[in-house]
Amino acid sequence: MAGLSPQITNMIIILGMMQVAKKIPFDDPQVLNLCRAVYIASNLIILSIYLYIKTVIDKKKDMTTLKYVEPAPMGSSEEGKLVTTTVHAYDVGQLKNLMRSQGMGVLMMGVMHLYLKYTNPLLIQSIIPLKSALESNMTKIHLWGQPAAGDLKRPFKQAAGFMSALQSGPAQADKKAVEAAERAGRGGAKEE
């Protein structure tokens, strides 16, 4: 599966786990508690990965200046905003987004399982978020030690997904776009 995109492998995992979930007796309280324990363990592993990455980011404290043009909001006629920040601040912001996304997933799963009494998603949500955390750009750079070049060059390209067609495009970090934004006076406020 190394040559397949993450979206394709996610679909394969989801379809496979849906078939497995049909055979699991969720009526048995021990089985249900085991699935809950696996889900909680998966989320604790993800949290520990993100906290470890935070300590690595803070230890590196890369204060290299990073300039890019943030795309304008969807449906807006205005130009993109120039953002000047540091690699450290950018990485911390990206990590916060990953943690917020994981927290929202846990909240949604809590509502689905505790309020709506769905049990099958426990299995899928024990695997897919962990896989995504291990494949994220932040993990590739700070945990696996890959160089921040190519697809891992900051600012990160948005992953192609279902909603990507609705967004106004990726952040532009090329010199021409940054200089044009500086001349136009769009933004330029330093983020810290």
Image (cartoon, rainbow, N blue to C red):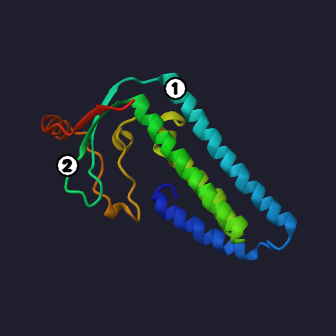
| Residue at 83% over, 65% down | 31
- Asked if the residue under mark 2 is in contact with the one under mark 1, i.e. CB atoms within 8 Å, the reply is no
Left or right of 2? Residue 76 is: left
Secondary-structure class at tag 1: helix
Q: Is residue 139 above or below residue 191?
A: below
Instruction: Name the foreground residue: 166 vs 8.
Output: 166
Q: Which residue is mark 2?
A: 79
Can the viewer see residue 93 in this picture? Answer: yes
| Residue at 35% over, 24% down | 64
Circle 1 residues within 10 Å: few <14, some 14–19, many ≥20: some
Residue 26: quarter of image: bottom right
Image spot of residue 153 (x, y percent): 35, 38
Image spot of residue 36 (x, y percent): 76, 59
| Residue at 86% over, 67% down | 29
Can the viewer see residue 131 in this picture? Answer: no
Gap between marks 1 and 2 measured at Cα = 33 Å
Mark positioned earlier in the residue sequence (1 or 2): 1
Image spot of residue 128 (x, y percent): 59, 58
Residue 173: quarter of image: top left
| Residue at 63% over, 55% down | 106
Q: Which mark is residue 110?
A: none
Circle 2 residues within 10 Å: few <14, some 14–19, many ≥20: some
Secondary-structure class at tag 2: loop
Instruction: Give the amino acid at mark 1.
Output: Asp
Q: Which residue is mark 1?
A: 58
Q: Is residue 46 above or below residue 149?
A: below
Residue 27: quarter of image: bottom right
Instruction: Give the amino acid at mark 2.
Output: Glu
In the picture, the quarter occupied by the C terminus is: top left
